[in-house]
Image (tube, rainbow, N blue to C red):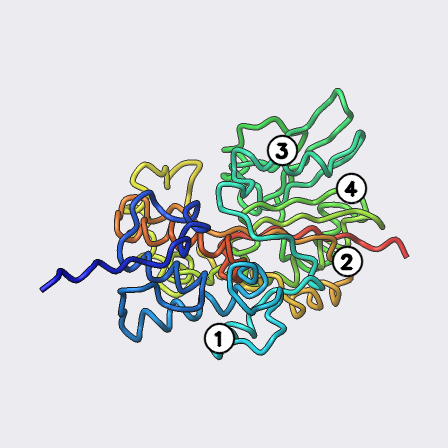
Amino acid sequence: MAPVPKRHPAPGALARLTSLARPKLSTAEAVILAIVERGRLPQGHRPGAGMLRAAAGLAGAGASRAALATPGIRAGGSRAAPHYWRYFGRMKLHARTNWRSIEPVDQFPGSASHPGFIGSYVDDDFEVLGLGGGAYPTIAGDPARGVISVLADIDPAELAKAETRFDRTICVDATAPLREFVRTVGEARYDLILSHMFVEHVRDPVAVHRNCHAALPPGGRAIHAYPINNNLAMGLNSVLPERVSREILKIAQPNRDLAGRDGKFPAYYKRCHSPSARSKRYFEGLGFEVESRHVFSGHGYFARLPVLRDLERLSRRVVVALQLPLVTYGIVVLRKPTD
């Protein structure tokens, strides 16, 4: 009897996604990526129902980006699509929310790189308020340009840890009553207010944004960078007791100086949402215009756990390629109207 020829995935089925995967794909990865691209199985594979549902969900949210790779589906999924195409339909991000394309986490302006992003919003003779900056001021002052940097935090001990050059510090509760906050910080004084990894730690974000609005003149901006808890790592951080999450963090990041500049604080993630029409209305209800929103996918909390790390990196690439609303970090740029 003649030998049975080997069956391989259809030529080109994975070719357009090679930039998303590791150099050597496992069978599970190849199946999921092929389903995401083509809406069907590659030849020779029969995964279980759970894997099919997972892949179908990934494909469903990616209609607008996967359209060119999926026969018969127009951009935006406007044609009569397979039933799985609507799996995540209600979660899709829309242009009217002023979001920009999802980027990988290495593009997120982290502690070492955020001044570069913020620099484009800082003009000469600006007075900038870094809210909740503590040990890590958001931006340094620049005497040559007349830029004044003011650092505000509720904890004097955190203010004392700051190493970046700043002009003065203010010890204030960002959620304080409006009159108290204005009396301490100043009214309509700052051209730009910045917060970085701060708003997720406050119980009353409405008060924070209300106070920021009062401290800005018409045309002033507030920029907030924050994590979003619709992922495993930050989702656990939002529900686990603080004592437990701290111990887990010690395992995940053993070199982190929890007693020094890299302390851990309780996180509530209130109003730390991915872009949506609802969140846009939320900021507009507080008196702001939403100028732009930036979202990022991925994190490094699984760096010491090889299996979870590889799964997270693969999912990150799929999320970015298909522009799924499963994001990890966000930046919102708010502007106080001039009218």
Query: If the image is split into quadrants, where does the C terminus sit?
Result: bottom right
Q: Earlier in the sequence, mark 1 or mark 4?
A: 1
Q: CA distance from mark 1 to mark 3?
A: 38 Å
The numbered dot on residue 242 is: none
Looking at the rendered image, the disc whose residue lies closer to the viewer, 3 or 4, is: 3
Q: Earlier in the sequence, mark 2 or mark 4?
A: 4
Q: CA distance from mark 3 to mark 4?
A: 18 Å
Residue that label 2 marks: 289
Looking at the rendered image, the disc whose residue lies closer to the viewer, 1 or 3, is: 1
Instruction: Name which quarter of the figure residue 179 lies in.
Output: bottom right
Residue that label 1 marks: 87
Going by the numbered disc 4, the residue's amino acid type is Asp
Q: Earlier in the sequence, mark 2 or mark 3?
A: 3
Q: Earlier in the sequence, mark 3 or mark 4?
A: 3
x and y percent of residue 254 in the render? 29, 40
SS of the residue at dot 3? helix
